[in-house]
Image: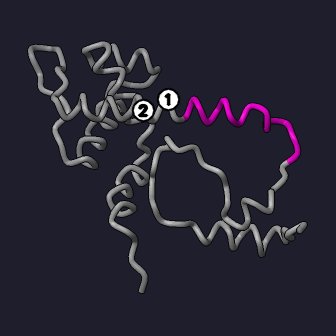
Amino acid sequence: MTTNPPSRIRLRRYLRHGMLPQLAALEAVVRLGSATRAAEALCIAQPTLSGQLRKLSDALGVRLFQTQGKRLVPTSAALTVLRAAHEVSFALERCEEALAPHRNGPGDVSAEAVRGRIPEPADRARWSDAPLPEIQSYLTERLAVTDPV
């Protein structure tokens, strides 16, 4: 039996629950101060937005909002999550920019990627320190990529 490194176990909660829509809901509520206005801005029903916030809160194990009258006030935990959400958003924007030259181009796989020597920027987001041998195996076996050297 193999075990996941602790960093991968901690991050599992972010990968299981459709976190991006939940983070978008959090950002909209913090920005607009109201679940109703946030739901309108996101073009979703208010109960759907409330459900996303509840699932996010449950997944993280923290309370995200307090109510003051009809207004939702973010807790310090919500602001911490919001800062992380902004970092994720910026990382996805950088990814989109990096992928732009590859769109509508040939779907080639380099031998460097198969050998696991993909160059990474020093300031990359670290989702996990664990290698992903199943991807390397897939590329090697299924795509029959051969080393040109």
* Residue range of the region highlighted in magenta in the rendering: 92-106
Q: Count the numbered circles shown.
A: 2
User: Residue 3: image x %, image y %?
Assistant: 39, 77
Name the chief secondary structure element in magenta: helix
User: Residue 93: image x %, image y %?
Assistant: 57, 29
Distance of label 1 from label 2 (alpha carbons): 5 Å
Q: Residue at x 41, y 54 (%)?
A: 16
* 94, 105: nearer the viewer: 94
Question: Element at badge 1?
Answer: helix
* 95, 15: nearer the viewer: 95
Q: Residue at x 44, y 21 (%)?
A: 42
Q: Indicate yes or no whether the magenta region holds residue 4.
A: no
Q: Quadrant of residue 138?
A: bottom right
Q: Is residue 137 left or right of residue 83?
A: right
Mark 2: which amino acid?
Glu
Mark 1: which amino acid?
Phe
- Which residue is disc 2 drawn over? 87
Q: Indicate yes or no whether the magenta region holds residue 100.
A: yes
Q: Quadrant of the C terminus?
A: bottom right
- Which residue is disc 1 drawn over? 90
Question: Element at badge 2?
Answer: helix
Q: Quadrant of residue 95?
A: top right
Residue found farthest to the bottom: 1
Label placed on residue 112: none
Do callouts 1 and 2 mark residues in contact (Cβ within 8 Å)?
yes
